[in-house]
Image (cartoon, helix red, strand yellow):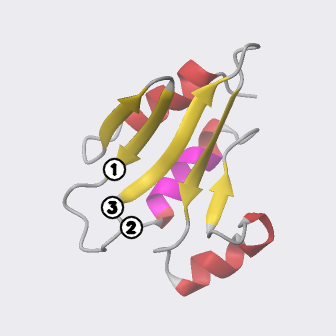
Amino acid sequence: MLTFNQAIKIFQSYSELNEKVSGNRHRFQVPQSLQRGKELAREIKCNQDGSYNGYINAKYMPANIKQKYAHITDSRQMISIKGLTALQLRQYKTELHL
């Protein structure tokens, strides 16, 4: 399982994402997005044990990708990133076609 720092570094590795930090929570936005909602990931925070919680916005994913992740998407159209692998985090970002 990834640590908080490893997960943050994955998001920081994409030049098109802007990081915003509020208190101990991180969010990543796509300023040049053509979509109204520019937020890719939100509420990413470190737990005491070094793990993390947070969400990826699935709202603007293409329909076929939404269907692929429907089983882990909540009613807010958010995908929990807790427990995801590095490959899965990179894959979600790629599938958003930013």
Q: Nearer the viewer, mark 3 or mark 2?
A: 3
Magenta-tinted stretch: 88-94
Badge 1 amino acid: Gln
Please say whether residue 84 is one of the residues in the magenta stretch.
no
Which residue, given by chain and number where applicable, does mark 1 sit on?
29
* In front of the other: 79 or 92: 79
Q: Nearer the viewer, residue 14 or 25?
A: 25
Picture quadrant of residue 73:
bottom right
Q: Amino acid at mark 2?
A: His
Q: Residue at x 77, y 63 (%)?
A: 72
Estimate the x, y position of residue 8 in percent, counting from the top left: 49, 29
Q: Residue at x 73, y 13 (%)?
A: 48
What's under tag 3, amino acid-wise? Answer: Lys
Q: Earlier in the sequence, mark 1 or mark 2?
A: 1
Secondary structure, magenta segment, majority class: helix
Residue 86, how many percent across, how many down? 61, 37
Residue lying furthest left: 32
Q: Of the residues under marks 3 and 1, which one precedes in the sequence?
A: 1
* Labels 3 and 1 touching (C-beta < 8 A): yes
Q: Which residue is mark 3?
A: 38
Residues at circles 1 and 2 in contact by the CB criterion of under 8 Å: no
Query: Residue drawn at (34%, 35%), measured in percent from left and top?
Result: 20
In what element is the residue under mark 1? Answer: strand
| SS at mark 2 in the image | loop
The Cα atoms of the two marked residues, 1 and 2, are separated by: 14 Å
Q: Quadrant of the C terminus?
A: bottom left
Residue under circle 2?
A: 97
